Amino acid sequence: MNQVNYHRLIYSFAQNYLNIKKVEVYDINGRLLKAFNNVLNLSIQTSGVYFLKIYTNSEIYNTTIIRK
């Protein structure tokens, strides 16, 4: 399984388990790069550090990802 499919599998599981409504992707400078309502696709982003803000029905999660 390649890295992109692996990330989609994890996102799909999280979306079903956490009931994700929206995901926002920010760069290291805090600029909003993209917002996704149902499919998270980082395959077009360059390598670097990104911050995700994940909205569910009841909570907002923040996490950091490193794209190699």
Image: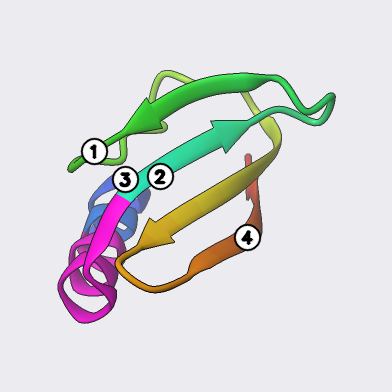
Residue 2 seen in render: no
Quarter containing the C terminus? top right
Residue 40 is left or right of residue 64, and the answer is left
Q: Earlier in the sequence, mark 4 or mark 2?
A: 2
- The magenta stretch spans which residues? 9-21
Q: Secondary structure at mark 3?
A: helix
Q: CA distance from mark 1 to mark 2?
A: 6 Å
Tags 2 and 3 touching, CB below 8 Å: no
Q: CA distance from mark 3 to mark 4?
A: 21 Å
Q: Secondary structure at mark 4?
A: strand
Tell me the amino acid under the disc marked 2: Val
* Residue 66 pos. (x, y %): 67, 47
Tell me the amino acid under the disc marked 3: Val
| Tag shown at residue 23 | 2
For disc 2, the neighbor class at 10 Å (few under 14, some 14 to 19, many from 20) is many
View extreme (front): residue: 58
